[in-house]
Image: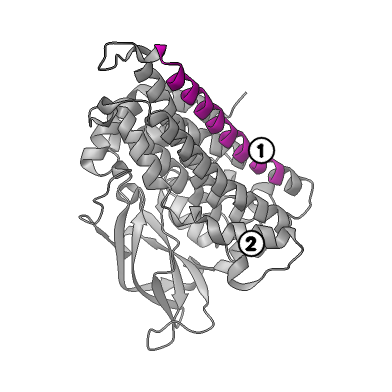
Amino acid sequence: MGHEVLGKVGEIADHLKKSSEGACSLGTLDTATVQYMKDAGVVRMLQPKDFGGYEATPAEFFEAVMEFGKYDAAACWVAGVVGVHPWELALNDVRLQEEVWGSDPDTWVASPYAPSGVAVPVDGGYVFNGRWSFSSGTDHCDWIVLGAKVGDQNGNPVMPPEMLHIMLPRADYTIVDDSWNVMGLEGTGSKDVIVKDAFIPSYRAIDVPRVMDGRAAVEAGRTQPLYRLPWSSVFPNAIGAAMVGICEGVLNAAIEYHSDRLTVMGSRSLDDPYANSAIAEAASDIRSARAQLLYNAQEMYEVVVRGEEVSFAMRAASRRDQIRVAWRAVQAADKVFEHCGGNAIRMDKPLQRFWRGAHAGLQHAIFTYGPVYDAWTRTACGQTLDGPMAATI
């Protein structure tokens, strides 16, 4: 039996299928889709119970994110990105949690985490400036968490770098409406945001190393296993789950298209054993990607439930697999797409929308494989890593 949110996603499948094309035209999810997503509860799955959340396991959340991908690539991506933010918010000062969720537990928080801003310390907090790209779902969010470097009094980042995640209400940042013009995932509305001379109280900022290594959970008094997991096992896998879900969308759309398609020669596509073989092989690869991601998530969760620490080696393996899962799923989706013929590229066909979304999503920095693969191999060979090589493990 899956989490109850999983069933609720299935109940809104018809709406998601119908709204997907319109979201591409709008450049953002429509308000009806957002309300359906809120009613389903996907963004509250990692939210603490004391603020109206489910406190689901990461694997349950990832499975729900994947379910969205079968119907709407943009909604799937937003479910993964926006849905993971409550996990980190739970590690913040309770005053901030009250501000965000106190009057509405369905409040959404956008991002990105890239340290594209500078926060200069002042009495009681920081003065914050910067511009960030790729704020997925931002039109429908009332708060945002942004990456920052601590600056000196001249606004220059201090050295060595000191990293913060800073949360701001909607009134303190500007969304750049014309900044999202892309070849895939158009419906995510991942627009740029600008912050200019915003005052940030100290309690709305959190030290990134404390989030990454688990100290923030201890300091916040979060004893639940969900919040004792390392950041690198939660955020990257949420984006990985979205990628697997979108590739499942490619597969499902291709099978539906393939089942009654006629080739230009008048033969049935279904009678082509080579196409059938490629689709079957791709289906197995995508299923393997799903299984690997969910297995790793559950394995680490069980380690924490036992009161043990998730080792650096396990974290490195999880990041290795999270990246490989996404690349394997997209490569499998490509195998399917290449057997679907010229009509598959028509804009009125859902197949091309899923396929473009898969390739757009793969450009996320969290899927940059070289440094992570290198870090895992060095760790497996007994080398101890620190500094930049260990930063996202």
Q: Earlier in the sequence, mark 2 or mark 1?
A: 1
**Residue bounds of the magenta highlight:** 271-300
Q: Nearer the viewer, residue 305 or 21?
A: 21
- The numbered dot on residue 295 is 1
* As drawn, 357 above or below 102: above
| Residue 246 in view in this figure | yes
* As drawn, 136 above or below 346: below
Q: Amino acid at mark 1?
A: Tyr
Q: Which residue is rendered at x = 73% and y = 68% of the image?
A: 384
Q: Which residue is rendered at x = 42% and y = 24% of the image?
A: 252
The image quadrant of residue 185 is top left
Q: Which residue is rendered at x = 66% and y = 38% of the image?
A: 295
Residue wearing tag 2: 375
Task: Assign a secondary structure to mark 2.
Answer: helix
Q: Which residue is rendered at x = 54% and y = 51% of the image?
A: 236
Task: Assign a secondary structure to mark 1.
Answer: helix
Q: Is residue 76 magenta?
A: no
Q: Quadrant of the C terminus?
A: bottom right
